[in-house]
């Protein structure tokens, strides 16, 4: 078997037995990148020289008996986390040459575990998008059909995994940006509970919504990544100091007696029939495996998109004010005054979608409109949180589609922002509520495009999600299928 096709646990076993080295595995991944990256376009920056140094160090560490689950494993990072000495662009021209002086906490944890950083993966500019078409450095393609989007904003992470251009990856999720591309590319993606994984070193889009999470080739790998990434960080004021369980223990517990809720609002108008059929097949398999299925209601679901597109742009308006052409990032060279510098640097550095959201957010926060828009959106958010709290009194997990439809063709929605925003209608509520959720592959459309099933659980109940995902993975037999690229 080609090394680049392996999962974390498969490669870890071979490394432990001395059958291969991390150097060989890393070379295999770069060989795969050289073979298919011209078609897929998943990476913004490759880290070839340093990655080989890290691989050699991992082999030495393993030889000394100090090799954990991620030691020597080649990983890709969404280009939204700071990496010391390695360019971090956030998919934007305004940060095209930015090299951070420090590592994000998640990056440090992965490096401390001995992981090999292959490079930085493509993303929608500042994580604002659902198709990865807003990236300033090109649009990555869906490996299952190169004419289709790979999803966003963590599209590069999902595309690289599906194309075997890394063994695992990390993404970030503000309104579905891990789960939606994972669904469209047929990989596993988890958004942990808000506060479970440190946000220190994550370039902020909407601070009350952003969360980093693992994207992997199977569910077992997800537990290994999540175990390393999770934990309290005093440098992140939103980090929650609570124990991190042994996630791998959840994989063998089965679902007998587990109460699985099916939110009726997630199966309404606009849901593609093939998506509904695939997800309902997954629900039937859970019932056959011993789970108790019940219908629940999340009555304020329809208001999620509207609330999100006030709250997230408002926070973006504040967070992105730091990109002013003065301290770091793109600086226009022909400004005649300080105000002119601000205007020209921001106009030239930001893409159209980022500028649109900054203007929406600034308007919502402006005098005379704050109460009408931002305050009301926060009140709706509270109602959505209450919906989830009530639902989890009736069930252990919620199961639903991730996206209302499979991946669409590149260019199909780029000139219709409202249609693009509505594609996240089923993922946004969990970000507003801060609950953990996952996309796990559950089938394919008639055109051969992947379909994901979403599992949501109560705050800090990631193990319940993994418990259900492991059963679905075993029963559906979809995880592990590969697109034909060459």
Image: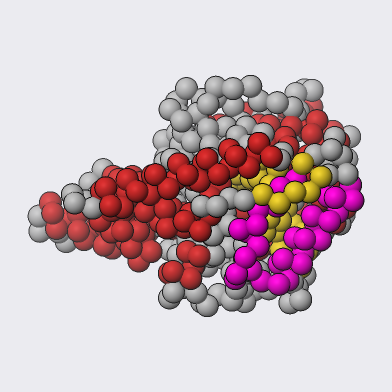
Vertical order, 116 against 451 (above or below): above
- Tell me, yes or no, whether the highlighted magenta stretch contains residue 43: no
Report the predominant secondary structure element of the magenta stretch. Answer: helix
Q: Decide which of 397, 227 is in the foreground and name it.
A: 397
Q: Decide which of 33, 251 is in the foreground and name it.
A: 251
- Tell me, yes or no, whether the highlighted magenta stretch contains residue 269: yes
Residue depicted at 85% across the width and 50% down the height: 287
The answer, for residue 49, to whether it is visible in the render is no
Quarter of the picture holding the N terminus: bottom right
Residue depicted at 54% across the width and 65% down the height: 423
Q: Identify the magenta region.
A: 260-289
Relative to residue 128, is residue 262 drawn left or right?
right
Vertical order, 104 against 268 (above or below): above
- Residue 135 appears at what percent x and percent y? 46, 62
Vertical order, 443 against 195 (above or below): below
The answer, for residue 447, to whether it is visible in the render is yes
Residue depicted at 21% across the width and 61% down the height: 344
Q: Decide which of 54, 67 is in the foreground and name it.
A: 67
Residue depicted at 38% across the width and 49% down the height: 377
Classify residue 155 by image quadrant: bottom right
Relative to residue 94, is residue 345 drawn left or right?
left
Relative to residue 322, is residue 98 drawn left or right?
right
Q: Decide which of 347, 302 is in the foreground and name it.
A: 302
Quarter of the picture holding the C terminus: bottom right
- Residue 391 appears at what percent x and percent y? 63, 42
Marks counted in the figure total 0
């Amino acid at each position: 078997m080609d090394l680049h096709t392996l999962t974390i646990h498969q490669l870890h076993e071979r490394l432990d037995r001395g059958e291969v080295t991390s150097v060989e595995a890393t070379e295999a991944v770069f060989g795969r990148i050289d073979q298919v990256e011209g078609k897929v376009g998943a990476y913004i920056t490759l880290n070839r020289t340093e990655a080989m140094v890290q691989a050699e160090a991992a082999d030495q560490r393993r030889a000394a008996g100090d090799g954990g689950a991620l030691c020597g494993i080649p990983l890709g990072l969404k280009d939204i986390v700071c990496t010391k000495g390695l360019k971090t662009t956030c998919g934007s021209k305004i940060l095209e040459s930015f090299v951070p002086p420090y590592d994000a906490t998640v990056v440090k944890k992965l490096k401390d575990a001995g992981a090999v950083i292959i490079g930085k993966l493509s993303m929608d500019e500042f994580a604002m998008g659902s198709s990865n078409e807003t990236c300033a450095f090109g649009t990555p393609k869906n490996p299952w059909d190169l004419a289709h989007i790979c999803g966003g904003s963590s599209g590069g992470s999902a595309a690289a995994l599906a194309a075997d251009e890394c063994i695992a990856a990390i993404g970030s999720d503000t309104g579905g940006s891990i789960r939606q591309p994972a669904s469209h590319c047929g990989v596993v993606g988890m958004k942990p509970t808000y506060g479970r994984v440190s946000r220190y070193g994550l370039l902020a889009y909407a601070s009350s919504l952003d969360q980093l999470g693992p994207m992997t080739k199977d569910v077992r790998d997800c537990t290994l990544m999540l175990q390393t990434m999770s934990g309290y960080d005093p440098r992140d004021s939103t980090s929650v100091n609570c124990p991190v369980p042994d996630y791998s223990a959840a994989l063998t517990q089965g679902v007998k007696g587990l109460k699985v809720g099916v939110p009726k609002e997630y199966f309404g108008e606009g849901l593609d029939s093939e998506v509904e059929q695939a997800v309902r097949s997954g629900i039937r398999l859970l019932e056959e495996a011993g789970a108790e299925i019940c219908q629940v209601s999340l009555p304020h679901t329809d208001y999620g998109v509207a609330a999100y597109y006030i709250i997230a742009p408002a926070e973006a308006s504040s967070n992105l004010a730091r990109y002013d052409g003065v301290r770091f990032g793109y600086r226009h060279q022909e400004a005649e005054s300080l105000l002119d510098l601000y205007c020209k640097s921001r106009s030239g550095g930001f893409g159209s979608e980022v500028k649109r959201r900054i203007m929406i957010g600034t308007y919502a926060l402006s005098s005379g409109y704050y109460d009408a828009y931002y305050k009301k959106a926060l009140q709706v958010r509270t109602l959505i949180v209450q919906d989830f709290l009530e639902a989890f009194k009736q069930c252990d997990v919620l199961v639903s589609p991730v996206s209302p439809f499979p991946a669409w063709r590149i260019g199909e929605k780029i000139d219709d922002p409202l249609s693009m925003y509505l594609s996240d209608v089923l993922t946004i509520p969990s970000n507003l509520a801060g609950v953990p959720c996952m996309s796990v592959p559950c089938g394919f459309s008639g055109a051969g495009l992947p379909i994901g099933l979403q599992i949501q659980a109560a705050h800090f109940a990631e193990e319940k999600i993994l418990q259900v995902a492991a059963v679905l993975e075993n029963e559906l037999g979809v995880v592990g299928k590969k697109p034909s690229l060459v």
